[in-house]
Every structure is written in structure tokens, then in C-alpha cells.
Amino acid sequence: MEIRSYRAADEGAVIGLWEACGLTRSWNDPRKDIARKMAEQPELFLVGTVGGDLVATAMAGYDGHRGWVYYLAVAPGHRRKAFGRALMHEVERLLLARGCPKVNLQVRTDNAEVLEFYRKLGYAVDERVSLGRRLIPDQ
């Protein structure tokens, strides 16, 4: 898999991948999420390709205190090939180069397979409650 930065021409393939992986939600417009990311640290939006086909994504950010990872996705037909691991290592490398001391991410509590994936990468559950408040509705 080749890892590179997201390009505008990737939008349709990225959204298709996110939909295939069950990452989209009615309250989050993926086009708006992409546009917002391209306005802030666009170099931290990565895609993975195989033979020119987009098969993986990872969106990261660093706020000066913590790094965050969103939209890590690997196409169902390309799983178990270490593509997710490779993307996470690249995200961590890019965040570490910025001086990022810790990476956070969120996983839905019922997603046992993904929780195990991150555990194997050395991530652990932080005893925290994640809170959120929508400031700009996407609908």
C-alpha cells in the first residue's frame, strides 16, 4: 500500500470507503468533514492506495496538547493486510514530528473488533467520559 496525502479528486472514493466501513452517520456530512479537514492541517489527512485504488484513510489533527485520529478505515476486501497498522504508524510519525506527546481516538463501545485492533497497537482505554456538543449542524 502506498500512503499519501488526500487529494480533492479522492473525495468520492473516500466517502464510498467510509460508507462501506460503516463510519458515516446522518448527523455528520462526510463532504463537510472533508472540507473542514482541508482547511486545518490538510497534510494530516492520509489515504492508502493499492494499484491506484483508494483502500484506506486516516484523518489526524494536533491541537498543541493532544493528537487525535478519526476516520481510520480499510476497505473490507483489504483488511488483515496490516494497512490499518501502516496508516496508524504514519499518523503517529507525523504527530511525533510535531512534538505531540499523546494520541487520542474514539471508538464506539460496541465495536469490539476495532477496540482489539487498537489494543494490539498499544492503545488502552482511558477512564474518561467523552462529551460533545454540536456547534454547527450538518443537516
Image: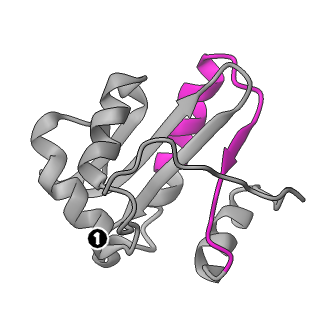
Q: Going by the image, does 138 lie left or right of 93? A: left
* Magenta stretch bounds: 86-109
- Residue furthest out toward the right: 127
Task: Name the spot of residue 139 as percent of width and height, x first.
Answer: 30, 57
Q: Going by the image, does 75 lie left or right of 111? A: left
- Between 1 and 88, the residue placed more toward the observer is 88
Write down the quadrant of residue 89 in the picture.
top right
Q: Residue at x 63, y 69 (%)?
A: 117
Q: Secondary structure at mark 1?
A: helix
Q: Going by the image, does 42 lie left or right of 98? A: left
At label 1, the amino acid type is: Glu
Vertical position of residue 6 compared to residue 109: above or below: above
Whether residue 36 appears in this view of the structure is: yes
Q: Residue at x 42, y 43 (%)?
A: 136
- Magenta stretch: residue 45 in it? no
- Between 96 and 132, the residue placed more toward the observer is 132
Task: Name the spot of residue 96 as percent of width and height, x first.
Answer: 65, 25
Determine crowd level at label 1: few under 14, some 14-19, many 20+ residues with C-alpha closer than 10 A. some
Task: Name the spot of residue 30 as percent of width and height, x first.
Answer: 29, 54
Whether residue 54 appears in this view of the structure is: no
Vertical position of residue 126 compared to residue 17: above or below: above
- Between 77 and 103, the residue placed more toward the observer is 103
Task: Name the spot of residue 133 as percent of width and height, x first.
Answer: 61, 49
- Between 92 and 14, the residue placed more toward the observer is 14
Residue with the mark numbered 1: 19
Write down the quadrant of residue 50 in the picture.
bottom left
Q: Residue at x 28, y 75 (%)?
A: 20
